[in-house]
Image (tube, grey):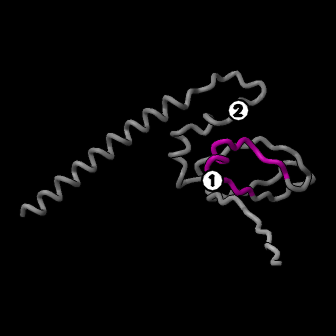
Amino acid sequence: MKQRKQQLGFPRTVLLIEIERRCAAERCNERNRIGLTKPEAHAYRGFTCARCERWHDDVLSERDVPDWWEELAVTGLHALRPPAEGDDQPTHDAGEVVARMSAAWRTRAADTAFAADAADAETRGA
């Protein structure tokens, strides 16, 4: 009788960025390298030091994610974050922004497709 080999399954997610932060504790100053996927980048509020296990509030800046900054900023970095304790800022409805962006994208895609069809028709006619 053959025995089956057990296989390990690992979920595959695309790494968006890797950031490096230093622990602010005077005696620690450990370098922490943090890998983030796109959903994690949206929800990023800080990190726990790997050495002293202290929490440090932190946010991403344009320097951290230059290629994705506009997309993250437009879709609202704060939209998916739970409000921090003591936050008096009103929460924003990300649904409206996403709906507007989706409508604009569909309009742009339709315009691009129309222009491509017109160019093809001119090429075939010439």
Q: Nearer the viewer, mark 2 or mark 1?
A: 2
Residue 111 colored magenta?
no
Q: Is residue 54 depicted above or below 33 in this figure?
A: above
Q: Quadrant of residue 84?
A: top right
Residue closest to the eye, 1 or 105: 1
Q: Where does label 1 land, which residue?
A: 64
Q: CA distance from mark 2 to mark 1?
A: 21 Å
Q: Name the quadrant of the N terminus.
A: bottom right
Q: Where does label 2 land, which residue?
A: 82
Find the magenta span and give its range: 34-49
Residue closest to the eye, 13 or 56: 13
Which residue is farthest front? 1
Residue at 91% across, 52% down: 52
At label 1, the amino acid type is: Asp
Q: Is residue 56 depicted above or below 116 in this figure?
A: above
Upstream in sequence: badge 2 or badge 1: 1
Q: Quadrant of residue 79?
A: top right
